[in-house]
Image: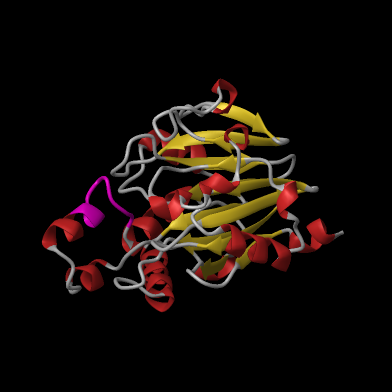
Amino acid sequence: MEYHVFESGSKGNCTLISSNGRYLLIDIGISAKKLRTKLKEVNVDINDINHVLVTHGHSDHVSGIDLFSKDQIYATKLTFEDLPFANELTPYQNYCINGFNVSVLPTSHDINGSIGFVISDDNEKLVYITDTGYLYQKVINLITDADYYIFESNHNVKMLIETNRPQSLKKRIMGDYGHLSNEDSANYLCDVITKRTKEITLAHLSEEANSPEKALSDLMAVFKKRGVDYDKYLIRCANQKDTVSGGNIKEEVK
């Protein structure tokens, strides 16, 4: 399995998962032109993309959704009411989508029907979770022991408080229906990573209330406090511009 986080953040989100010539796209919050460019960079034709998983209906996740037909889109009914019945996703249910096993995880965000995913092929397991204020215990159990984590680390609390954003927005972001802080993200990761885990990609970083350097230093501080060896894992930050790729890329190229 390999993954390519094309964009991640408040301006747009889109990630490609692939295994043995099969593809899943998670969210389409970028333009058709940009998606075609990003796919070309990783040698994938847009006509090969026929299965799109949608986490929720905020514009930074679905602004380019019209590029795909309804029968190619998979989401909760609360996200898109007019999806074909076979494409409706229900939290805590498992689905076979284009040869992948997809487990649907409810997230806690300020929009109905928001979800994350555990995606598995025959050999590996990837967790994709962004846009959530906290994680339910059942979700924590389901995301334990994965090979790869694409995991929200939205803000540094101090940096967020010091922004000029309205107080109501700050409270929303830090609340149970907002976004995970760097510290919360790192603590959850300490709870779920195992010897099996290879890579962590921190996602949906705020451009105003975070930075890649801050997200990584906050994670390192938590890992050190909890006695977790940071150096055992490949840890990077996704961003709003450049593609971040991971997984068994060499194996996939073969």
The image position of residue 211, as x and y in percent, is 38, 75
> Compared with residue 90, is residue 226 higher up or lower down, i.e. above or below?
below
> Compared with residue 7, is residue 217 higher up or lower down, i.e. above or below?
below
Residue at screen point 65% across, 34% down:
101
Q: Which residue is at the front of the view, 213 or 245?
A: 245
Q: Which residue is at the front of the view, 250 or 68?
A: 68
Spot the residue most to the bottom.
213
Lateral position of residue 40 relative to residue 60, left or right: right
Q: Is residue 195 visible?
A: no
Residue at screen point 68% across, 61% down:
39
Q: Which residue is at the front of the view, 184 or 36?
A: 36
Q: Quadrant of the C terminus?
A: bottom right
The image position of residue 176, as x and y in percent, is 25, 46
Query: What predominant SS class does the magenta segment belong to?
Result: loop
Residue at screen point 68% across, 41% down:
50
Looking at the rendering, the stretch of residues picked out in magenta corresponds to 172-180
Q: How is the image coloured?
A: secondary structure
Lateral position of residue 171 relative to residue 216, left or right: left
Residue at screen point 46% across, 31% down:
76
The image position of residue 172, as x and y in percent, is 21, 53
